[in-house]
Amino acid sequence: MNLDDFEDAIDSSVILQRGLAYYRDKCVLSLEMTRTNHYEADVAGTQLYTVTVTLDDAREVEDIACTCPYDWGEYCKHEVAVLYSLRHQLNSTPHTLVTRPKEVDLASLLEKKSKKELLSFLLSYARKSPELASALVAAFPSPDGEVNLTNLGIEFRQACEDGIECPEDDEDGWDDEQYGWQFSPTFRKKITAFLMMARSAIQEGDIRYGGSIATMMVHELSALDEYEDEDETLTDEVESVLREIAALFDESTIRPDDGSWLFTQFLPEAKQYKGTLQAVLLSLCLRFAETEGDQKVLSDYLVSLVSDGTQLEGQVNHTILTSLKFQHALLVKQGRIEDAQGIALDNLSYEAMRKLAFDYALGAKDYDLAEKLAKEKEASAYIPRGDMDWSVLLFNVYQASGNREKVRELAKMFLLHDRLDYYPILKESYEPREWEAVVDGLLDDLQVRDGAKHASLNRQNPYPEVLKGEGRHGRLLAYIQKHPRLVQNYQEVLLPHYPKEVFALYRQIILTDGEASSSRKEYKAVASWLRELSAIGGEVVVMDCLQSLSPKYMRRPAFRDEIQMVGLL
């Protein structure tokens, strides 16, 4: 690895980015050449770490080491920061580095500095050193909490930097490309501790102190954007924390002045995020934007998102959609309902905006508009997709408007597509005499459709369920005899009418499976069928099954054990 292009030799882009950030933030506090081609540096991290580097005459890195505990990869961020610093200094002043004095009269040195210079240095260094910040808080406690918040910010920033990890592979260690990044358990505990501090302050009425902790967390978490393109899991983790932060204010009464203050804290942070993460923070800004001025600021920002976004044909621009949804919500908050409906109707190409327009039309009993909005999106053949089922929304319109014929038409279609929950709705739409006249035809349609599909225990079968609901026991038995394994689902309703037939179905399954079984799992399943048959009153049939299977289970100890375990031998 050569100093001039060491980036190519470091596999982890995250470590490179963190090291570069440490270098730019001047965390490399000193760098000296202790002997020819051997360098030593102090780097501010969670504590002060020492990095040593040895080069050859061609600037190849022969050796590099750091006193930090990092052992997840070949290089740490402190080493990278020093490599950047060393390259810069050697390129600026080849082979000469200023050696810092080993002993300094600090008192004389500090006396020459002004209060402003000392304060600036301490605050700058404290941001990089939690140890110094903690020492300052202990030595000079502040009643207004300013130093404490500074310290908390430094502590949480360091937790963010050290709190991202990859799950470990049992054999080969961790692989960020295979497993992705996630929060470490230690970092999750730190997050919980900070959330508890913020919640406690808010519950005690100190909204601004709790809000400061919350916005500090939001600010520091925004630095994790570097991982967003690498792994969605980390984005999900950040979103979860942001939602917990938003929930801190759910049960608190916020005074107008505190609300306006919170708005000014969260809006700049929201601008640092994108996508779902930004939407979570904008929801907070919307909640706190109570004054006309704050609402104007929020509105202007939302409009700027639309103007900055580019809409490609056939694609959803999520930034524009987020802006439109919050513009709509802000107008509703202001009581400008018609304007809100206008912005929804002007952006119907976005399904979410169409849904907002639909909801308003349905609530306002504008059934013609609601029907039009739903029918434009309804599939010609019913194929429910995603979270937005426009056929169901259209059904809601017909229910609300009292259009009985359309309710029946769609309810039947849903039922034929395995939506059993529409069976009672369909039935209730008829008078009893009317229902008797149509139910047989409905059952015939269900039977035809069911026959075209594979009967399975793993899917909802409307045909037998409607037979059961209508008390058509003979027809239900005939169906079960074609699909014997469904007998478990319907034995309770069939037994009072057809006990012999039900027992025969159990016998058929037990003997077939018993002869074919060859593993402990299969023996256990057969024993379970036997136990169930005995429990529903088929003891005689159980004995007949045991007698028929005895040649096999007598030769298979595991089979015999399973039967004994259910108490039948």
Image (cartoon, grey):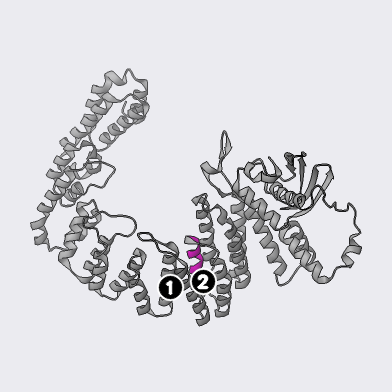
Horizontal side of residue 432 vs 326, given as left or right: left
* 10, 394: nearer the viewer: 10
Name which residue type carries label 1: Gln
Q: Residue 61: x percent and y percent? A: 73, 40
Does the magenta-highlighted stretch encompass residue 471? no
Magenta region's main secondary structure?
helix
Distance between the Cα atoms at labels 2 and 1? 12 Å
Residue designated by label 2: 285
Q: Residue at x 26, y 65 (%)?
A: 374
Q: Secondary structure at mark 2?
A: helix
Quadrant including the C terminus: top left
In the image, residue 147 lies at what x, y percent? 72, 67
Say if residue 250 shows up in the picture.
no
Indicate left or right for 447 with 390 as reference. Answer: left
The answer to which quarter of the image holds residue 529 is top left
Q: Is residue 281 magenta?
A: yes
Provide the secondary structure element on which disc 1 rests: helix
Residue 413 visible to the viewer: yes
Counting from the top left corner in percent of width and height, residue 420 is at 23, 53
Mark before the other along the chain sequence, 2 or 1: 2
Q: CB under 8 Å between callouts 2 and 1? A: no
Q: Label 2: few (<14), some or many (≥20) within 10 Å?
A: many
Compared to residue 363, the image places residue 319 above or below, namely: above
What is the number of callouts on the image? Answer: 2
In this orientation, which residue lies closer to the viewer: 428 or 381?
A: 381
Q: Which residues are magenta?
A: 276-282
Q: Which residue is mark 1?
A: 327
> The N terminus is located in which quarter?
top right
Q: Residues within 10 Å of mark 1 (few under 14, many from 20)?
A: many
Q: Position of residue 518 (x, y in %)?
A: 33, 24
